[in-house]
Image: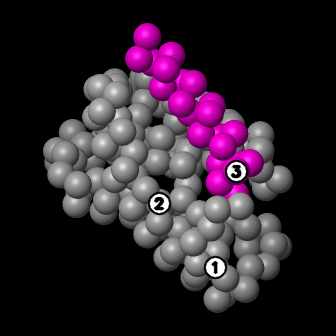
Amino acid sequence: MKKFVFLLVIFGLGILEESFLSNFRIFGASADMLLIVVVVASLTFRYGWALAFAIFAGLLRDCFSPNTFGLNIVLFTLWSLLIIRLSREIPIESAFLRFATVFIITFLHVLISGIIFISLGRLIPVGIFLHRLFFTSILTAGVCLLIFKLVEYLELK
């Protein structure tokens, strides 16, 4: 039952992010809710379910995004595998480690996405790219702390 609820949460956050939250920006950046869901799934569920949730979140993002289809599926799966591997080596239970993990994953996601877009000929001004790189990473990591509290409250573990 928890897995079905989490699947509905992913779907709801995907729709919410593309509709309501796309207008809610702080300093021009918004939190990447689907990336947060991938981190939560990777730290909460078993290997197979975490990958399935990451693929579903990536598919949802790619369906709503006008960008290259498949990019988010690949990157979200990669992040999930990385987090699962990291959590086996280091217990990521403190708020600081969760914040740092989400910040680094978001930073890498925006950086790699930007590099791929530039290589495809879509020019991004340097100032906008750096602004998005840092503010999105900080905002996503901050919101992630709230999401982890919500997950603990709902006892999805």
User: Residue placed at 56% from the left, 33% from the top?
Assistant: 10
Marks 1,3: beta carbons within 8 A: no
Which quadrant would the N terminus be assigned to in this image?
Answer: top left
Query: Which mark lies nearer to you, 3 or 2?
Result: 3
Which is the main secondary structure of the residues drawn in magenta?
Answer: helix
Mark 2 lies on a secondary structure that is: helix
| Range covered by the magenta-colored residues | 1-22
Identify the disc placed on residue 140: 2
Asked if residue 84 shows in the view, the reply is no
| Nearest-to-viewer mark from 1 and 3 | 3
- Please name the residue that numbered disc 1 is placed on: 129
Left or right for 51, reference 28: left
Considering the numbered disc 1 on the image, is that residue within a helix, a strand or a loop?
helix
Q: Name the residue nearer the viewer: 21 or 120.
A: 21
Residue 55 position by quadrant: top right
Marks 1 and 2 sit apart, C-alpha to C-alpha, by 16 Å
Above or below for 86 versus 44: below
Q: How far across and how far down the image is residue 135, in percent?
A: 51, 74
Residue most extreme to the top: 1
**Disc 2 residue type (three-letter):** Thr
Q: Residue at x 44, y 23 (%)?
A: 49
- Residue at figure coordinates x 69%, y 39% from the top left: 15
Q: Residue 141: which disc? A: none
Label count reads 3
On residue 20, which mark appears? Answer: 3
**In this rendering, the label closer to the viewer, 1 or 2:** 2
Residue kind at label 3, given as amino acid type: Phe
First in sequence: mark 1 or mark 3?
3
In the picture shown, does residue 14 fall above or below 105?
above
Q: Is residue 117 left or right of residue 145?
A: right
